[in-house]
Image (spheres, rainbow, N blue to C red):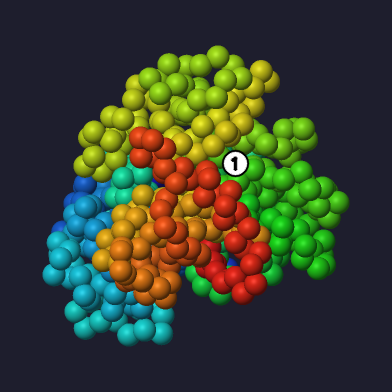
Amino acid sequence: MNISWITDAVAGQVPSVSPDSPALALGTGDPLSYAELRERELLLATALRRDGVRPGDRVALLLRNCTDYVALYLALGRIGAISVRLNWRLTAAELSYQLRDSAAGTVIFDAEFGERLAGIRREVPARTYVARTGSDAAAPEWAVPLEEFAGSAADGEFPEIGPDQPLTLMYTSGTTGRPKGALLSHGNAVWIGTVQALNWKFDHTTVALTQGPLFHAGGFEVLLLPALLRHGTAVTFPSGGFTLEAMLEAARRHSATAMLVYSFMLAEFGGIEGLETLVPPSLQRIVTGGDTIMPWVYDVFEKRLPGVNLTQSYSLTEGGAVALHLDHTVARGRETSVGVPQPMTQVRIADPLGTEVPTGEVGEIHLRSPGVSIGYWNRPEETAETFAGGWCRTGDLGRVDADGFVTLAGRAKDMIRTGGENVYPAEVEKILTGHPGVHDAALIGVPDAKLAEVGCAVVVAEPGAAPGEAQLRRYLAERLAKYKIPRYFVFARELPRTASGKVLKYLMKETYANLGERPGAPAGGEDPA
């Protein structure tokens, strides 16, 4: 089975869903029916094949959340091409790297990103650029409008696609500073959606709403994909201008039964005035992830939304989107846990040599399931290292307690989780130390009331140089996405190190833990969509 089953079931001899059933909506807008989604998918698939896109080709999507994003994802899957889901927050330099690394032959983008792409067109081996003309920005003259490109008829002649064929490629930052493209196959995607639907009892009445960007697994593979596979309704929130109140309005408009609310939003969400009347009576489950849920958060939700199950989830793009879950009904007394494995998911804790350690001991969390990525794009050595023996090495430290619940013990990969985004210090440090006035630098995560954690750059200047904070911000802004730029910059004579030269980041975290409490501390963070 491949991902095309979602809409093919509408046209089957024994349809599992009415063609008129609502399939996909954007915010509070009217939903597309399954028949309309299928028609759009087939038109786009036909046009892409006519333009020369073939199985295995990479097609980059640089789009804000929209219904066409899902239609294009399905269309590319139908013809066996691989969708490269680009983060539209990235700078031109970052996009250039990912486009060159994936060797994308076609780029489909929102017109507003035309100026960013214009400067890198010569560097990127893309055959065709196609602009979506839904924003206020005019399509660049060198791009073909999507409506003109799509045509008006589908030929219905498409190749047979097997479950092992690659479907989508999502870039994840790495400890080396270079993002890696994690590949998910058709089989991976079908399993990721099916296991959530099985575990959370989704059916055709499910209405799942997320506000995350569709280029993230958390924005599409979590909740939306299982809703579509069960022929319920998927609601994605428009990018930009996000507020929790607006999300609740969309939830009421579509009678949402499940919602994704990032962990850093839970405190604000639980404190909304009149929350009890703003949440639709249909809501059964709120899924969250990224950080463990504090006990007081459960107190708030049990008091204000007693009929809603607050579910913690844990995984990573390579590990199958949702590998572990902590259900509200068993969370009391286990608030520091990230839960138990999803159905058909195995978890083990291993030492650095890959040997499983006894129950209760700390080691690296390894995952194995049919949802684990088939590997990194053109990275055989890193693929072999991360996916050894069918297990996905997460880079996170944890333990399995006697009752089978998994508890995190730290991040082996030194990752900073800020506002729903992963920031890897190695990537930022590599660029920061490229500044002529910077001798040494380290990036640490420090607490933040809104985003849970933000970056703090500890900088050692070159002798005789004095780069200011504003200068370093401008330098990074030309090379990194906004969310990766540190919230704070502090200057030091040297970085604390061990005798072997390893930076003692835990000491710096202790030193600068209270930066957010200083007067005039800068505000930051972007909406998650």
Position of residue 151 in the picture relative to residue 207 (left or right): left
Position of residue 86 in the picture relative to residue 317 (left or right): left
Label tally: 1
How far across and how far down the image is residue 254, in percent?
65, 63
Q: Nearer the viewer, residue 337 or 258?
A: 337
How far across and how far down the image is residue 95, in percent?
28, 63
Q: Nearer the viewer, residue 490 or 331?
A: 490
For image coordinates 73% across by 53% down, the residue present is 283
The amino acid type, in three-letter code, at marker 1 is Ser
Q: Nearer the viewer, residue 257 or 367?
A: 367
Residue at image mark 1 = 313
The residue at the far right in this view is 303
For image coordinates 77% across by 62% down, the residue present is 271
Residue 119: name its quadrant. Answer: bottom left
Q: Residues within 10 Å of mark 1 (few under 14, many from 20)?
A: many
User: Vertically, is 292 above or below 95?
Assistant: above
For image coordinates 56% across by 72% down, the residue present is 522
SS type, badge 1 = strand
For image coordinates 55% across by 49% down, the residue present is 509
How far across and how far down the image is residue 310, in percent?
71, 46
Q: Nearer the viewer, residue 80 or 305?
A: 305
Which quadrant does the N terminus fall into?
top left
Residue 280: name its quadrant. Answer: bottom right
